[in-house]
Image (tube, rainbow, N blue to C red):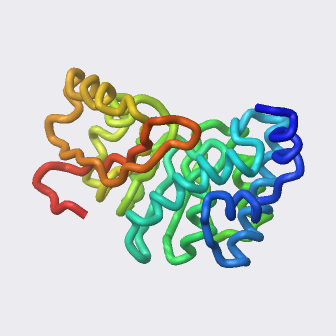
Amino acid sequence: MSELETDVLDSDTLTEALKRHSIELAPEHVKQLDRYCKLVWEWNTKLNLTRHTDYEKFVSRDLVDSLELSKLLGEGEEVLDVGSGGGVPGIPLAILRPDLHLALCESVGKKATVLETIIRELRLPTPIYNCRVEDLLGDFRFDVLVARAVGPLWKMLSWLEPKWHCIGRLLAMKGPKWPEERGEARHRGYMGKLSLRVAASYPMAGTESDSVILKIWPKGSPER
């Protein structure tokens, strides 16, 4: 990156980054997302929450992923963000889609505490569960589980294997190596009772590859 490009990013704003990517959002959503960025970046100096610490990276990766995911969610669905980490995609979805009944699940206590603080600051009606997803699903059912950067596909499916009666579908965000991950999940025996298809595919910023959103649901159940 040139010195000029670095100076531009240092003086960047969320509004300018949105314009570069031709993304139009309601002013109140821009204001909340900007507040979210500043909160998570402030906490990031104390606890490793995200690698995306400027507006360009936030918009081109975090926000684009969240917007693509939003297109696959029906009005009023109950959604759980698994392994929320720094809050993506859960918190952007909560801001952009207030119709959703959205919750966050984060097993690391320090991260869960930070997420609670950020959610409170943003005044979002979004519960945060500090536990493993497989423990939570014993008591709750969700229309959709969403997962981004929480581990290889086989590992996620191993967590969910006995819990599919509590899940309508899983939307897993993956990079270009997803076929290898699917192959590994099949090899380990986790795909036998599941259907999988690519629900969305879109360019991955800064690369010549695509990001995908995989939809996974139990065989014999209606595709949703």
Residue 200, horizontal then vertical, whole percent: 36, 53
Residue at 46 percent across and 44 percent down: it is 133
| In-front residue for pair 91/54 | 54
Q: Quadrant of the C terminus?
A: bottom left
Describe residue 110's horizontal placement relative to residue 179 as left or right: right
| In-front residue for pair 200/19 | 19
Residue 122, horizontal then vertical, whole percent: 75, 66
Residue 38, horizontal then vertical, whole percent: 82, 54
Q: Is residue 118 visible?
A: yes
Q: In which quarter of the image is the N terminus?
A: top right
Q: Quadrant of residue 196?
A: top left
Describe residue 87's horizontal placement relative to residue 203 as left or right: right
User: Where is 214 relative to 20, above or below?
Assistant: above
Q: In which quarter of the image is residue 118?
A: bottom right
| In-front residue for pair 130/75 | 75
Residue 19, horizontal then vertical, whole percent: 68, 64
| In-front residue for pair 129/73 | 73
Residue at 70 percent across and 41 percent down: it is 52
Residue at 86 percent across and 40 percent down: it is 4
Residue at the far left in the pictured view? 220
Q: Is residue 112 visible?
A: no
